[in-house]
Image (cartoon, rainbow, N blue to C red):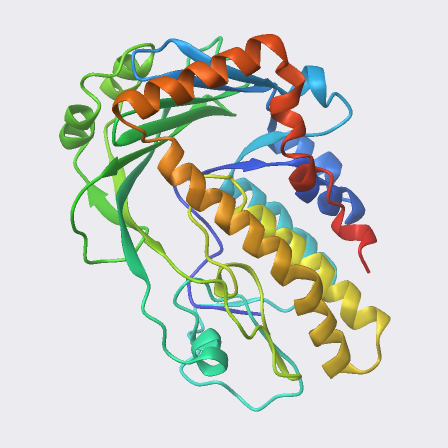
Amino acid sequence: MLERAAALREVGAGLQISPNAVRVIEALGLWPRFEEISVPSRRVELHDSVGRTVAVLDLARHRPADHFRLVHRAKLLAILETAAREAGVQIKTGHQVTDIPDVPLLIGADGVKSRLRSELNGIETPFFTGQTAWRTLIPAEPDAAPVAQVFMGPGRHLVSYPLGAGLRNIVAVVERPDWREEGWSIAGDPVELRAAFARFGGPVPEWLARVDEASIWGLFRHTVAAHWQDGRRALIGDAAHPTLPFMAQGAVMAIEDAWVLAACLAADSDQQSALARFQALRQPRCQRIVEAANANARNYHLRGPTRAVAHAGLRAVSRLAPGSMIRRFAWLYDYDPTTVV
């Protein structure tokens, strides 16, 4: 495995890992390690911008047998790296791929700017969604509940959840007219972040008062790749299906991909057939997830009468039929990558 970075690490990033990916982690025998570095997510709370509850997805009540976890990305990468090395995988960091070699099998997990994707699909230009996101970590409150909270306002929203080890993850998204650079490591101004959410209530002002530094990135929309493989080369993760972060499924889809690709190759001695099966199994599901994330990008930022009607509907459903909200996502969370091949 070749990795351009000098080390496999990620600074300042939290992840929500849902049961569909946890099943892969369990099948790999990594659950004890993963349980140790992550915390359970008991529910998801949707609030309006002043902090009033709009809806609650009670994960612990309505899906008690499933594992929804919150984890720091660097810790997840660390256990995956250790497990890969223990399995005999050679990982070479500090190696940038400058051309595409002619080898029997090449897997491109090289992200939204994938060289291999361009080889298989041609050059594609993503378009700016009109949204930018701040990402930061702050010290968590000692009694922080294991809950993912979303605060929705006109043209902006903020998501936060504890990661364990005394940390709280914050992602704050704001609409703006233009943005040029697609990248994850641009330094943002905490003062600008606080100003953007100055009218938010609940715990948001206190959280943002504790922000010392934050990164900012523009949210660009990419299509799901039409061609994932050509019999010798294949794409997985963001290289195949970049997604906006509004379903918390980016890392999860990559974990699903990895298992299904390995299973297809193990089950079929004909590599070309195996790679074709991999794309056939994965592409429709990933397309559906990406489209759901695109929809949330709009729904979180509603304004005026549309927002009032939508929030009233969510409050009614959450109060009268609370289990129905989580059942809407059964297609997402019931999926078991370890049984599809």
* Residue 315 shown left or right of residue 21 in the figure: left
Instruction: Please identify the quarter of the rendering in which residue 18 is found.
Output: top right
Decide if residue 337 is in sight here.
yes
- Give the x, y percent position of residue 162: 48, 23
* Residue 14 shown left or right of residue 171 in the figure: right
Q: Camera-side residue: 177 or 141?
A: 177
Where's the N terminus, which quadrant?
bottom right
Instruction: Please identify the quarter of the rendering in which residue 90 is found.
Output: bottom right
The residue that appears at 19% across and 52% down in the rendered structure is 179
- Give the x, y percent position of residue 295: 44, 41
- Give the x, y percent position of residue 218: 27, 49
**Residue furthest to the bottom:** 102
How many discs appear? 0
The residue that appears at 72% across and 44% down in the rendered structure is 25
- Give the x, y percent position of residue 172: 31, 32
The residue that appears at 28% across and 13% down in the rendered structure is 206
Q: Is residue 47 above or below residue 254?
A: above
Where's the C terminus, which quadrant?
bottom right
Decide if residue 12 is in sight here.
no
The residue that appears at 33% across and 25% down in the rendered structure is 306
